[in-house]
Amino acid sequence: MNTLLSQLGPTFMDLLPDALHDLLVAQGTRVRYRGDQLIHSRGDDSQIVSIILSGGARAGTFGHDGSYTMTSILGPGQTFGEFTVIVGLPRSLDMVALGETEILELPGPKFTRLCDEQPELSKALLSSSLIRTYMLLEIMDAMRRLPLLERTAKLLLILAEAPMQTDHLNYTQADLAFTLGISRVSVSKAVGRLAELGLITLGYRNILVKDPAKLQNWLDRRQHLAV
Amino acid sequence: MNTLLSQLGPTFMDLLPDALHDLLVAQGTRVRYRGDQLIHSRGDDSQIVSIILSGGARAGTFGHDGSYTMTSILGPGQTFGEFTVIVGLPRSLDMVALGETEILELPGPKFTRLCDEQPELSKALLSSSLIRTYMLLEIMDAMRRLPLLERTAKLLLILAEAPMQTDHLNYTQADLAFTLGISRVSVSKAVGRLAELGLITLGYRNILVKDPAKLQNWLDRRQHLAV
DNA sequence: ACAAGTTTGCTAATTTTTTTACAATTGCAG
DNA sequence: CTGCAATTGTAAAAAAATTAGCAAACTTGT
């Protein structure tokens, strides 16, 4: 669960030469989204590549029953929609703006043309995609191997290091439960224990991770023992 | 857990124009591996891109305690090692040959040069990488949402549709347990129930999925009910 | 065809997690 | 300031999964 946001490596935009960066910005349309505004839904087949300029976005799925499972959080420099455009399948996740967010949007055909003309673009996208795959594998591994308490800690760490986040994580414990795929009671117990250990501070509708490094450290030691 | 093998889309090799396909084969070295032979280990930083020509490979991690968790299975036309070469980080998974396997190996520098010269190569790699990411997200979703019985069924389905596989899946229940990250007893119960339902037939060191479509059907109905 | 080593099927005891239910707390709207 | 709705903390019971252990079934090498 090592995150999709506190990037292990550079983001797509980081990987781009300046010239290309400028070209993209020139060719795309800047669109602003308010916090919690839906950017697009699972199943859409709008062919648009989105690049986050500022703010952030969270990816997840809304269940038929209104539940929500968060899959990942994206920050500035990261992209989404390229799967839809390049592979030609409908979007698999709902995307929601995380706070005031500015996104650069490029129509699919224009983007693919740019890719053809500028091999560097494909290469940057490839690198960021490979990095993403790597992280997903790490996350899957964590999900299978780590006990509930550690998994919860890891999620908090991911959220704490997310872009557009103050110290206080404004999520309800029910949200966290959905995200982790465990019960609210279990979350309550887990965060309770973490709070006991002085790693986090609990509030109403929010959790404070004052010292992410400390939490990370605790987690690392835990994982070490487990393996 | 929708597979990394019964490809949802085309494989890397499928995406390649014939000319490039031939070029790669000409530039690479064919290497044969016996069944269960270790191709490379987690942590290696050998810079080699591997393309499976025939046979297959399974990716996973060996724990310090000798345990093994399978992450995915790759078949002909699929690649691995590109992460290492392009991003420059050590390998994250142990790869083991699945039966008699022939692999085309390209040294990293040669591969990156080819990528620079042939943009089509980057593009094919990009598509297959995006497809892989998509599948991983599906798998993660399944892991969080599906109960143990369904997860087991899904794994069997994935394995049954894997390349290099006869009707009989030659895995011990302990193998399946490792792969699913659950206990052997739980697997035993799960496959027992599936056998009761007539969806599979149990044997010694192997499981027969005579009618994958039927199993798929059962799973679909189950998932529908769950959501 | 036998002995040795795996693998499977089961059981019982234990641990973990979920469910259900309810009280206490918090923020907010009026 | 007060009452309401949402959120959190907790406890007890139920369900699910794990561990540990053992006997029976099965392969294989000799």
Image (tube, coloured by chain):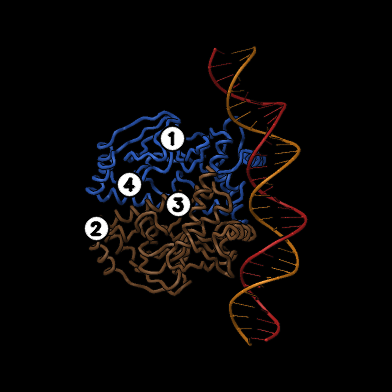
Chain colours: A brown, B blue, C orange, D red
Say if residue B5 shows up in the picture: yes
Element at badge 1? Answer: strand
Q: Secondary structure at mark 3?
A: helix
Q: CA distance from mark 3 to mark 4?
A: 17 Å
Q: Amino acid at mark 2?
A: Gln
Query: Label 4 marks which chain's residue?
Result: B
Residue carrying label 4: B88
Distance between the alpha carbons at the discs numbered 1 and 2: 37 Å
Cα–Cα gap, marks 1 and 3 = 21 Å
* Three-letter residue code for mark 3: Leu
Chain containing the residue with disc 1: B
Q: Position of residue B168 (x, y in %)?
A: 54, 33
Say yes or no: labels 2 and 3 on the same chain. yes
Element type where label 4 sits in the image: loop
Q: Foreground residue, A92 or A68?
A: A68
Question: In which chain is the residue bearing label 3?
Answer: A
- Chain under numbered label 2: A
Tell me the CA gap for discs 2 and 4.
Answer: 23 Å
Task: Nearest to the eye among marks 2 and 4: give it.
Answer: 4
Classify residue B193 by image quadrant. top right
The amino acid marked with disc number 4 is Gly
Labels 4 and 1: the sequence-earlier one:
4
Disc 1 target residue: B96
Residue B23: x and y in percent read 25, 40
Q: Which residue is mark 3?
A: A136
The residue that appears at 31% across and 52% down in the rendered structure is B123
From the image, which quarter does the C terminus of chain B lie in? bottom right
Separation of disc 4 and disc 1 at Cα?
Answer: 21 Å
Nearer to us of marks 4 and 1 is 4
Task: Please provide percent x and percent y for residue A83.
Answer: 39, 57
